[in-house]
């Protein structure tokens, strides 16, 4: 009788042990599955962050960084030239977890920038109408000007006017025009004349869609393209190229203390801003 009771006790202990082991196994498995699920969610979130960084760098054609949904969810993207017109965008998304660990995902894309050609800008000043140079105005080098030219905007820049306007870094009207003037600056002048009478320092590509009169102190490096009447009478120093696509009945006038220096290097630098407007995605991969 005692031996039977002892057997039952031992059997009960074995059953209890087995059940405990099973429950422990189920618990550990449940914890592992929960951790795996959380890790999968964080990995997916990191991937989305990397995508956001790549998209921002692609649109702006430059480095990007930021956060989405809190400071623990961040992205960093860099643009690196490869060769010629090809670049890579490397974007890393990172999720910082409560336990101190980090989950990262990376996206690497290859893009081809649009083709621009600085040699198409051949003069310091080029206009579709008669060019009047008066007073102490100076165009360097001598003979670096052309009047009655045919200006083809898409051929010069590699993009249409609509594409240039849509991709402009800054968009102004006469009422809002002012600093900064860099990258691509587009100014719409629907009527009248934009009178620039104050100090202005800028660079890149400045497109003025309308009539303009430079009467202040202006220092500009890059390309000034006027779709209308151009008059320069102030203290203007422009290095690069100035072009005026004017009505055939209106002259382009440059007078006063104006110096225009034809500078291919400044033109080439300015066109780097335009190349990104017609870029193409070549390849894409994720890690």
Image (cartoon, rainbow, N blue to C red):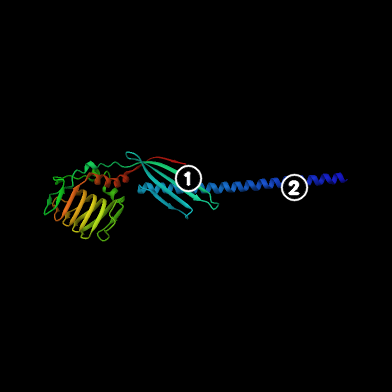
- Rendering coords of residue 211 (x, y %): 19, 55
Q: Is residue 250 visible?
A: no
Reading the image, the residue beneath label 2 is: 16
Q: Do tag 2 and tag 1 residues touch (Cβ < 8 Å)?
A: no
Q: Is residue 113 left or right of residue 72?
A: left
Q: Which mark is residue 116?
A: none
Q: From the viewer's perspective, tell me whether residue 11 is left or right of residue 185.
A: right
Tag 1 secondary structure: strand
Position of residue 128 in the picture relative to residue 20 (left or right): left
**Residue 10 place in picture, x, y as percent:** 80, 45
Q: How many marks?
A: 2
Q: Residues within 10 Å of mark 1 (few under 14, many from 20)?
A: many
Seen at 53% across and 46% down, the residue is 40
Q: Which residue is mark 1?
A: 105
Mark toward the start of the polypeptide (2 vs 1):
2
What distance separates the C-alpha of mark 2 from that of mark 1? 45 Å
Residue in the image at 82% along x and 46% along y: 8
Q: Nearer the viewer, residue 251 or 237?
A: 237
Q: Residue at x 81, y 47 (%)?
A: 9
Q: Name the residue at the top extreme.
A: 83
- Quadrant location of residue 6? top right
Give the quadrant of the N terminus: top right
Q: Position of residue 41 (x, y in %)?
A: 52, 48
Residue 76 visible in rendering? yes
Q: At which x and y percent is residue 178? A: 27, 58
Neighbor class of circle 2 (other Cα within 10 Å; few <14, some 14-19, many 20+) is few
Front in this rendered view, residue 250 or 5 = 5
* Element at label 2: helix
């Amino acid at each position: 009788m005692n031996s039977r009771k002892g057997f039952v006790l031992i059997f009960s202990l074995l059953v209890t042990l087995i059940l405990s082991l099973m429950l422990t196994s189920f618990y550990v498995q449940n914890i592992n599955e929960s951790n795996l699920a959380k890790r999968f969610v964080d990995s997916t979130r990191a991937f989305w962050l990397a995508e956001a960084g790549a998209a921002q760098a692609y649109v702006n054609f430059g480095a990007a960084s930021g956060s989405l949904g809190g400071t623990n969810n961040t992205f960093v993207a860099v643009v690196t030239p490869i060769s010629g017109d090809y670049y890579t965008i490397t974007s890393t998304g990172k999720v910082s977890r409560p336990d101190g660990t980090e989950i990262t995902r990376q996206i690497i894309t290859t893009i081809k920038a649009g083709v621009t050609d600085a040699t198409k800008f051949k003069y310091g000043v080029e206009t579709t109408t008669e060019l009047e140079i008066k007073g102490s105005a100076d165009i360097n080098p001598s003979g670096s000007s052309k009047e009655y030219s045919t200006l083809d905007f898409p051929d010069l820049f590699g993009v249409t006017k609509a594409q240039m306007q849509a991709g402009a870094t800054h968009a102004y009207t006469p009422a809002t025009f002012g600093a900064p003037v860099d990258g691509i600056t587009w100014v719409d002048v629907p009527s009248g004349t934009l009178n620039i009478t104050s100090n202005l320092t800028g660079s890149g590509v400045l497109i003025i869609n309308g009539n303009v009169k430079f009467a202040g102190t202006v220092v500009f490096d890059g390309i000034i393209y006027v779709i209308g009447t151009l008059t320069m009478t102030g203290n203007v120093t422009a290095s690069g190229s100035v072009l005026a696509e004017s009505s055939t009945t209106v002259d382009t006038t440059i007078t006063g203390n104006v110096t225009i220096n034809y500078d291919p290097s400044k033109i080439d630098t300015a066109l780097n801003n335009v190349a990104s407007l017609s870029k193409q995605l070549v390849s894409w991969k994720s890690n």
